[in-house]
Image (cartoon, grey):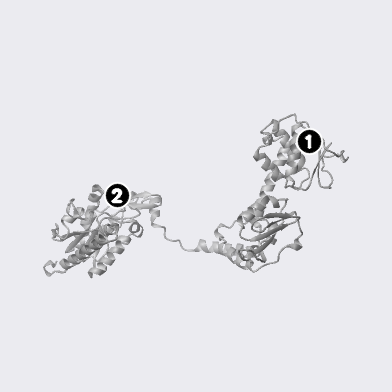
Amino acid sequence: MNQITLSHETDVDLWRAAVRPLLARRLPPESLSWRVGQEAPDLFSDMAEPPRGKTRLAVTHPIRITKQQMALCERVLCHTDPARFHHLYSVLQRLQMDPHALDDPGFHSGKWVRAADQSIRRDRHKMHAFVRFKKVGDRPSSEGAREVFAAWFEPDYRIVELTAAFFARRFTGMDWSILTPYGCSHWNGEILSFSPGVDKTHAPDADVLESAWTTYYSSIFNPSRVKISAMMSEMPKKYWKNLPEASVIPHLIQEAEHQKSGFMSAPETAPHKLARKITPDVYALRATPKHITSWDEAKQAAERCTSCALHQCATQTVFGEGPLNADLMLVGEQPGDREDLTGRVFTGPAGELLDKALIAAGLDRRNLYITNAVKHFNFAPRGKIRLHRTPTVDEIKSCKYWLDLERKFIRPRVILALGKTALRSLTGYSAALNSVRGQKISGLNGDIILATYHPSYLLRLPHGQARAEACRKFTADLSQAQSLADAPQMMK
């Protein structure tokens, strides 16, 4: 009988050094006896004391132990069952001849090692999750005072050394000690050390931080996700006595039932506008009137327009807004990202610049009818961002029907085209905008059409003299349009 004596229960280095020559000689597990210090041998040893002295072992077989297998052994050595040495040696010996030995359901030691490893992993996870530090003082250092914390935990197995590196990485900025019956780990900001286990009388008392932690835990407790059975499975009651938040959990669970009832009885909230794109189009069942006789009918019909492909991706139709007897109409290009979500014209960055220019020109937006040549947002997706795209000629022609209806029902005296797209929709003119800017163009309804820059064009100009000059011209064009609309000879 060969006896191997380890210095302590998790003596990985000595165990590894002893196992390799034994495996090389293919010694059967039954011929080995394991003991820790002066403790009695395990169940697989004969009780006779073997002769002491060094024995030279003849290596007759090559040995191969992978990193994964060694890591498995280090974990299972943390188990409390004395038979762990026998089972681990049996597994390693079998693996030398059969690399799939652990998958054999008939291999008893393999089944035991797999189950033990699973238990150790679970216990390690629980320790990572349920250790709660309490402040016990401060320690002076060259960098100033360092806070000192301590925690008491009762693991099922000897996993203190197995978990210490995790806590050193996570709580590197403070000094701490984790006390357990199986051993203690300590960190001083530089060195990780270990000491024998202690009883619960050494556990730290409550500290001032516990009330703050309890308040924080209560604030993040999500009643809509409470599952009592899952909570009890993942956080067994054996850990509650060391958790500060355990005192409020019953109350939070009780409150969760009341809040859940409140959620169920609360009135339904309005769906997001984007939800229209994933629900059946109920408007498709309503036919567009052949003869639209009012602005309201035009707006309702435009909301279910499918004349071009833009309606498939845009959130909604963005129709014009303003008084229906307005003397001055502003026509932009198309809705932007913010307009597409809000359903209102010129509410994005270009709208903010327009509002400032209107104030500078002495105009009141509430007296203007503002719309766009194209009623749906035309964009190219770039991840989560929707980038503006210039409407095509076909899209401009498709939306001209709605713009003509707006002109018909508003009957403005003056129309100011903001940008080239609006000018093309109103007049069919496709040349450079600067060539007609400031000139009066007669419309089909007896109105006057003027052209100026689109506010988004001004935003794209670099800051400097060129941008300042363009903004000055834009403000002057707004003033000119208002002056023409106020002229007596333009009376309707």
Could you tell me residue 212's position as x and y percent?
60, 67
Q: Secondary structure at mark 2?
A: loop
Q: Quadrant of residue 24?
A: top right
On the image, numbered disc 2 is attached to which residue? 306
Q: Quadrant of residue 316?
A: bottom left
Residue in the foreground of this view, choosing between 167 and 145: 145
In the displayed structure, 119 sits above or below 110; it is: below
How crowded pointer 2 is (Cα within 10 Å; few <14, some 14-19, many 20+) is rated as: few
Residue in the foreground of this view, choosing between 186 and 33: 186
Residue in the foreground of this view, choosing between 342 and 93: 93
Image quadrant holding the C terminus, namely bottom left
Relative placement, left or right, of 479 versus 123 is: left
Q: Secondary structure at mark 1?
A: helix
Could you tell me residue 431's position as x and y percent?
17, 51
Could you tell me residue 110's position as x and y percent?
71, 38
Image quadrant holding the N terminus, namely top right
Q: Marks 1/2: CA distance?
A: 80 Å
Q: Report the mark closest to the observer, 1 or 2.
A: 1
On the image, numbered disc 1 is attached to which residue? 29
Q: Residue at x 29, y 49 (%)?
A: 306
Could you tell me residue 308's position as x and y percent?
28, 48
The answer to whether residue 23 is seen in the rendering is: yes
How crowded pointer 1 is (Cα within 10 Å; few <14, some 14-19, many 20+) is rated as: many
Q: Amino acid at mark 2?
A: Thr
